[in-house]
């Protein structure tokens, strides 16, 4: 087992890793930017080093500075968290060349699955269902028009790199396809330094369901069941739950087995998520991508399975076997996670950095709050707007919804705008309560006036 680990991240996930390491008896080294200087979670690390200025491009994305901190801190491994360098194959390769263990997949597996076109080819070989679309990257406008005619409009233009909805456009006809190709490529190049795009058939009003997997270096691959991440806005998840509420038992089995089959065929190790869309009219599922890292919503999988994913990541990276069979992974109750973002839903979800002047966090049986913020904390404008995750776990879905509604009513954040009013609306919504939703539900139905009186 490692003696010291560096966390190449910040905020809530850095705190999550520090806590897991403490329970494993591992010392931790934190890194921080000038924007995070003085953050309380840094005090819990055994050492902390400033690696640059407020922008992530001058700090958390600087591989050379992170490696220097790792060498000064005398660590054996680096945990990348999520975001920043978590899915950067070059960073994983640099860690290996410096004899530092990267707590995640190998750079080879990351290259295979991090590129969406390459991942689709692996999925096809593993007999995992794919959305009809182009065989590879679109190389010309003429090719795009031909593929679109073959699979039928509407079509989805998708960037081969990255995620979060960047480099993605829906085209309803040839004219919007031509315009969308250019816009998606420009956006993808700016966001990911990769302008490659491909086409998929657009599935109308699908659900977004993903499978949590973990694989060791001894050939064992296990799934921790599936999560439903359908409630989104602008392709960014707001609410996640496990298990998915609408999947028939036989479809759940097929979905999870397909995810395991895919990562096995790619030689994947450590934690990852295989994402699918589900056509609600047929319950057919289609592979869309692999997230080669731990994800924000991993706590809901932990709660239904009883397995600590961060500790499992560390043990796997240290060469230990998983130590449990698939039959030993339970699916107990229902877990839900609501992302609390410092955003103003009344004004187009504009970011709301600033100082939290009052904070009252909910509690009680089955309630978990994963966050690094506190009353008096100043949210910097430089990073993602999420300030924490409110998570509940109850025996049934109805009980989980009731618990979440109670917890959201208790929650008080003053000084900045948050998504709490929107979340109160969503958990009170009959369509959500009865699982009659899809990935476009918020954009189609929610209006700012709903939350105005909260």
Image (cartoon, rainbow, N blue to C red):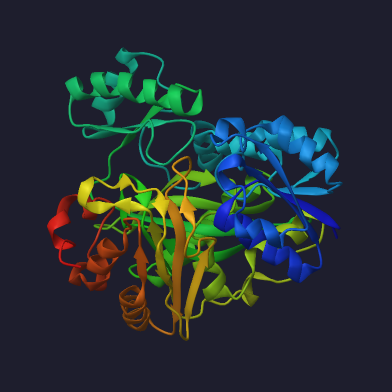
Q: Residue furthest left?
A: 449
Nearer-the-camera pick, 361 or 217: 361
The residue at 74%/63% (across/down) is: 21
Above or below residue 169? Residue 1 is below
Residue 97's quadrant in the figure?
top right
x, y percentage for residue 385?
42, 49
x, y percentage for residue 68?
79, 35
Q: Is residue 196 visible?
A: no
Quadrant into which the N terminus falls:
bottom right
Above or below residue 330? Residue 184 is above
Residue 437's quadrant in the figure?
bottom left
The residue at 61%/49% (across/down) is: 263
x, y percentage for residue 70?
79, 42
Does residue 303 appear left or right of residue 158 in this picture? right
x, y percentage for residue 375?
47, 65
Nearer-the-camera pick, 10 or 196: 10
Above or below residue 247? Residue 199 is above
The residue at 56%/54% (across/down) is: 11
Q: Is residue 432 visible?
A: yes
Does residue 416 appear left or right of residue 65 in this picture? left
The residue at 62%/35% (across/down) is: 59
Residue 168's quadrant in the figure?
top left
């Amino acid at each position: 087992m490692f003696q010291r680990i560096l966390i190449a991240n910040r905020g809530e996930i850095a705190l999550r890793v520090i806590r897991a390491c403490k329970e494993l008896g591992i010392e931790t080294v934190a890194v921080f930017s000038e924007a995070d200087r003085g953050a309380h979670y840094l005090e819990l690390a055994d050492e902390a080093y400033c690696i640059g200025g407020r922008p992530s491009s001058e700090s958390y994305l600087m591989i050379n500075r992170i490696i220097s901190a790792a060498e000064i801190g005398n660590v054996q491994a680096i945990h990348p968290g999520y975001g920043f360098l978590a899915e950067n194959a070059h960073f994983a390769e640099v860690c290996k060349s410096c004899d530092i263990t990267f707590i995640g997949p190998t750079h080879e597996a990351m290259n295979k699955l991090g590129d969406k076109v390459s991942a689709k080819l692996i999925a096809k070989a593993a007999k995992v269902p794919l959305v009809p679309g182009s065989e590879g990257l679109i190389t010309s406008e003429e090719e795009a028009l031909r593929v679109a005619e073959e699979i039928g409009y509407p079509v989805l233009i998708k960037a081969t790199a990255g995620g979060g909805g960047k480099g993605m456009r829906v085209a309803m006809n040839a004219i919007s396809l031509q315009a969308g190709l250019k816009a998606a490529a420009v956006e993808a190049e700016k966001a990911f330094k990769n302008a490659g795009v491909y086409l998929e058939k657009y599935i109308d009003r699908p659900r977004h369901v993903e499978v949590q997997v973990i694989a060791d270096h001894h050939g064992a691959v296990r799934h921790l069941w599936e999560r439903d991440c359908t409630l989104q806005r602008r392709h960014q998840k707001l609410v996640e739950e496990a298990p998915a509420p609408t999947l028939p038992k036989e479809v759940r089995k097929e979905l999870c087995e397909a995810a395991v089959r895919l990562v096995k065929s790619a030689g994947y190790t450590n934690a990852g998520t295989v994402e699918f869309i589900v056509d609600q009219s047929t319950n057919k599922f289609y592979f869309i991508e692999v997230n080669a890292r731990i994800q924000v919503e991993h706590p809901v999988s932990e709660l239904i399975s009883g397995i600590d994913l961060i500790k499992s990541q560390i043990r796997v990276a240290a060469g230990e076997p998983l130590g449990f069979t698939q039959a030993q992974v339970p699916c107990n109750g229902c877990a839900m996670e609501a992302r609390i973002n410092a955003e103003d839903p009344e004004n187009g979800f504009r970011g709301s950095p600033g100082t939290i002047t009052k904070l009252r966090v909910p509690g009680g049986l089955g309630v978990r709050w994963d966050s690094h913020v506190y009353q008096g904390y100043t949210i910097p404008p430089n990073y993602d707007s999420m300030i924490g995750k409110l998570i509940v776990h109850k025996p049934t879905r109805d009980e989980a919804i009731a618990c979440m509604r109670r917890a959201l009513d208790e929650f008080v954040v003053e000084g900045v705008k948050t998504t709490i009013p929107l979340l109160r609306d969503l958990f009170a919504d009959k369509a959500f309560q009865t699982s009659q939703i899809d990935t476009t539900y918020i954009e189609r139905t929610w209006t700012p006036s709903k939350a105005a009186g909260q």
